[in-house]
Amino acid sequence: MNLKILSGTANPLLAEKIAEAVGVRRSQVLLDRFPDSELHVEIQESVRGADVYIVQPTCPPVDEHLLELLFMADACRRAGASYLSAVIPYFGYARQDRRSHGREPLGVRVIADLIASGFQRIIAVDFHSHAVESAFNIPVEHVSAVSLLADTARSSIHGDAVVVSPDLGAVKMAERYAKLLDLPTAIIHKSRISGEEVSVRRIVGDIRNREVLIIDDMISTGGTIEKAIKSLIEAGCSTSGLKVLASHGLLVGPAAQRLGPLPIERMFISDSVPAPDSFPAPLQIVSLAPLLAKTIQRLHRQEPLGELTARE
């Protein structure tokens, strides 16, 4: 069975890198809009009998990229593809995994059902919560960028450093970083005021006069990271060597204004979504292409993923 890699418009550069690492040519897809703004998709080569992987993070504009993914899946299925896998490096709507007030949709389940209607498998990188996997009724291969990011940051870590989780939700991820880097951990207890605002209650762990590495699965508007850094500085951490590591750097809305003035030495983020053209804090982009290429190759050969998977 031939292996085919396709891409939507969300992150074609990453798809190109994945195809190159796998050793195949990225298949051509036409995506354009009719005059009334309706989406038009056409697969421009044969995928009959193929094992097809469609690379498409559902990053902003989330709904447009999601519709592209679904249309490409339907086009491939109707063109005779044997097996369809959605490669979603960043999974939008993952934070809508519970209802807060009762009159809201369970967004992650709605999106999971839509994706499952067109695909036989999903490959995702560092979900916002492992609970997201339970929304799917198709196989989910959940892999992690933690090892890639830790390996990249390792040479820049100096002295008596500590890995900091900015909230309780990132504790397990912080422990994985700490184990890989052989460092202690600290935890910030926070309360969320709104989708963009958080408040810090207390810090558990020794951070005084120590270099800190703040980790998270994603940075959206930067509110969590901003509050974390300010509270750590108030608590007496070292203001030199301050680093931020995140699997997904959306960096939308007021992220630049919030993080730019802070004493961040470097931010390590993956290329799960395209990096901003400019950002006031120094960014180091770590490519997911080797990880996703290896994942695709093992799945195509029906081999176990082993150490590539994201574990709690």
Image (cartoon, helix red, strand yellow):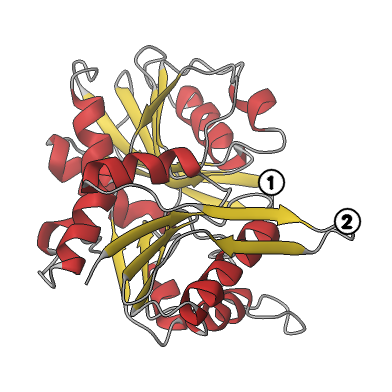
Indicate which disc residue 197 carries.
1
The structure residue drawn at horizontal position 61% and vertical position 16%, both measured from the top left corner, is 261
In this rendering, the label closer to the viewer, 2 or 1: 2
Q: Report the residue at 21% width, 61% height from top.
A: 309
Q: Report if residue 269 is visible in the image.
A: yes
Figure disc tally = 2
Percent coordinates x, y for residue 279 in the rendering: 59, 20
Q: As drawn, which residue projects farthest toward the bottom?
A: 137
Instruction: Give residue 186's position: percent from left, percent from top.
Output: 32, 41
Q: Residues within 10 Å of mark 2 (few under 14, many from 20)?
A: few
Whether residue 288 is visible to the viewer of this picture, yes or no, is no
Residue at the extreme right of the image, as rendered: 36
Say if 244 sits above or below 272 in the image.
Answer: above
Residue 98 in picture, x, y percent from top left: 58, 76
Task: Compare residues 128 and 3 and report the one nearer the observer.
Answer: 3
Check disc 1 and give the amino acid type: Glu
| For residue 298, above or below residue 98 | above
**Which type of secondary structure does the marked residue at label 1 adopt?**
loop
Instruction: Identify the residue under disc 2.
Output: 35
Q: Are marks 2 and 1 in contact (CB under 8 Å)?
A: no
Q: Amino acid at mark 2?
A: Pro
Identify the mark nearer the N-term, 2 or 1: 2
Residue furthest top as drawn:
240
Where disc 2 sits, the SS reads loop
Q: Is residue 282 left or right of residue 242?
A: right
